Image (tube, helix red, strand yellow):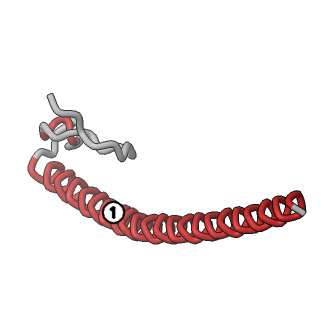
């Protein structure tokens, strides 16, 4: 009879342990889902920021190209000689590249 009681107690402890593990697993799954949703929101926000920056960069490049073209036209009007066309280097400006990395501090 004592053996039967011991077995019953062990069964109850086992059932409680399984319930505790299931609750921990459910809580961990919920936390994981919250973290995934948070990362997705952050990714969406960063994607929007990148799109805006790409648009700004494109607009700036277009404006730069128009300015360079106008400067070249002005140069050809004011200097009808065989001098080279105006470029960033002749204006003392940095070259335009497709490199999106920020400039390095010196």
Question: How far from the left and from the top, in percent, is residue 33?
Answer: 57, 69
Q: Is residue 46 left or right of residue 71?
A: right
Name the quarter where the N terminus is drawn.
bottom right
Residue farthest top in this picture: 106
Q: Is residue 20 left or right of residue 56?
A: right
Q: Which residue is mark 1?
A: 53
Question: How far from the left and from the top, in percent, is residue 56?
Answer: 30, 65
All told, the count of numbered labels is 1
Q: Secondary structure at mark 1?
A: helix
72 over 7 or under it: above or below: above
In this rendered view, identify the residue nearer to me: 59 or 70: 59
Give the quadrant of residue 101.
Answer: top left
Q: Residue at x 53, y 67 (%)?
A: 31
Q: Residue at x 81, y 64 (%)?
A: 11
Question: How far from the left and from the top, in percent, is residue 67?
Answer: 20, 59
Q: Residue at x 70, y 69 (%)?
A: 19
In this rendered view, identify the residue nearer to me: 55 or 47: 47
Q: Residues within 10 Å of mark 1 (few under 14, many from 20)?
A: few
Q: Is residue 60 left or right of residue 10?
A: left
Q: Is residue 18 left or right of residue 88?
A: right
């Amino acid at each position: 009879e004592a053996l039967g009681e011991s077995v019953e107690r062990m069964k109850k402890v086992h059932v409680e342990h399984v319930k505790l593990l299931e609750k921990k697993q459910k809580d961990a799954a919920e936390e994981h889902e919250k973290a995934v949703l948070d990362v997705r929101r952050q990714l969406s926000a960063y994607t929007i920021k990148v799109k805006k920056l790409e648009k700004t960069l494109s607009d700036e490049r277009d404006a730069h190209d128009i300015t360079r073209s106008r400067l070249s036209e002005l140069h050809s009007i004011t200097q009808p000689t065989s001098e080279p066309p105006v470029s960033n280097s002749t204006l003392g400006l940095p070259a335009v590249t497709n490199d999106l990395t920020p400039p390095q501090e010196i």
